[in-house]
Amino acid sequence: MSEKIKIAITGGTGFIGQELVRELMDDSSFTLALLSRDENKINFNVDKRREIFIGDLCDKHSLEAFIKDSTVIINLAGEYIDQDLMINSNYIGVKNLYEIAEKYSVPYFIHVSSVGVYGRPPSGLINEDSKLLAINEYEKTKVLADKYLIDKGRKKNKGTKIIILRPSNIFSPRMKNQSLKQLYSHVKRGRFFYIGRRGAVANYLYLNNFIDALKCVIKKRSLKGFDTEIFNLNQTDTLENFISYLKQNDSRSTIYPRLPESLVYFFAYLSDFISSLLKVKLPITVDRVNALTSRAKFCQKRFEEVYGHSYKTSMKEALKECIDFWSEEKNVSIK
């Protein structure tokens, strides 16, 4: 009889969490415990292999029944919009979750962080030992949680094993974040332009590949030692290739101009200033220019070496799936 693995998941009612839950429910060796603050957000049926708990990461007592008897905890919860909630959800909540995991001797704690903890390195190969130089509040709270868990891992030789995953920009055709679909629209309409010299890279991770990586970690959770294990998860390609993948269903030949980096940054800073004054969102921002000029690559060699895992879906194939979905749904209008 195969081992039954009970997995406690926070953030299971979010978009990524829902996709993960659906995948895990296809494997009869898993039973799931899901935590939600709001029972109205629960889109799953409760059955023998899936149990729902109403609780809050900031309320330790509400976490006990949820965590008890689990083999693995996966923390997908995170606040990235409301700054007032970020410290509680992204840091205090992680501390509470881990402390209860320790109390009940849960063997494995998988914390989903972000490559955002490295800040905005302009170039270079960024590995798990690179400096944490977070810029915005979301990233800073992620750094606090990572440092807390790293410190906990260093101070013990038994107890709950900590694994931190740092994915890059996760994408899927159905995600609420529309930035990739907007980029596709600009490329399709011929409104895209390159910034500065060649050599910029695109760091993304297809949602299905991220979920496969998570499942791999769950099933191969026999890491040695008790130091916190940290893994970057990323798919990297040149920006030129990435843009060509967004055009793979378009037979028209389009030449995209290349504008001086200094000029675009001037207008981006001006745009951000106007946005802050008028409380409106403008299409060009410093963050977007940073993303389109970055030459930094987030290395995931450590993950590949430890788990022997490679992604099933290439960047080109993943973007093809996105384009086909957007075209079928007629969510992108081409004029």
Image (cartoon, helix red, strand yellow):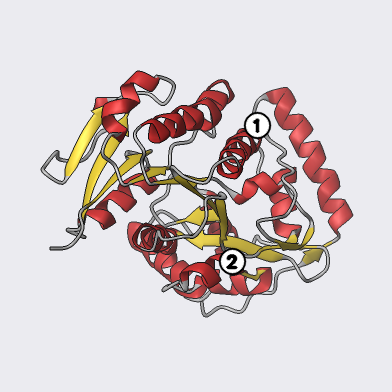
Amino acid marked by disc 2: Arg
* Numbered badge on residue 302: 2
Q: What residue lies at 84% left-to-right and 57% top-to-bottom?
A: 261
* Left or right of 5 in this view: 173: right
Question: Is residue 251 visible in the rendered structure shown here?
Answer: yes
Q: Measured along the vertical axis of the image, is residue 139 above or below residue 204?
A: above
Determine the image quadrant of residue 167: bottom right
Residue 282 in picture, x, y percent from top left: 66, 39
Q: Position of residue 90 (x, y in %)?
A: 53, 32
- The spot of residue 207 in percent (x, y) is 43, 58
How many labels sit on residues?
2
Residue at image mark 1 = 137
Q: CA distance from mark 2 to mark 1?
A: 28 Å
- As drawn, the label of residue 258 is none
Looking at the rendered image, the quarter that the N terminus falls into is bottom left
Q: Nearer the viewer, residue 160 or 193?
A: 160
Left or right: residue 123 compared with residue 248: right
Is residue 82 at least partly visible in the picture? no
The residue lying furthest to the front in this view is 157
Left or right placement of residue 155 versus residue 273 in this view: left
Q: Residue drawn 49% across and 60% down? A: 224
Give the left or right position of residue 74, taking residue 305 as reference.
left
Give the x, y percent position of residue 175.
42, 49
**Above or below: residue 138 compared with residue 49:** above
The numbered mark, 2 or 1, whose residue comes first in the sequence reads: 1
Q: Please state which of residues 243 and 72 is positioned toward the viewer in this rendering.
A: 72
Task: Name the residue nearer the viewer: 268 or 254.
Answer: 268
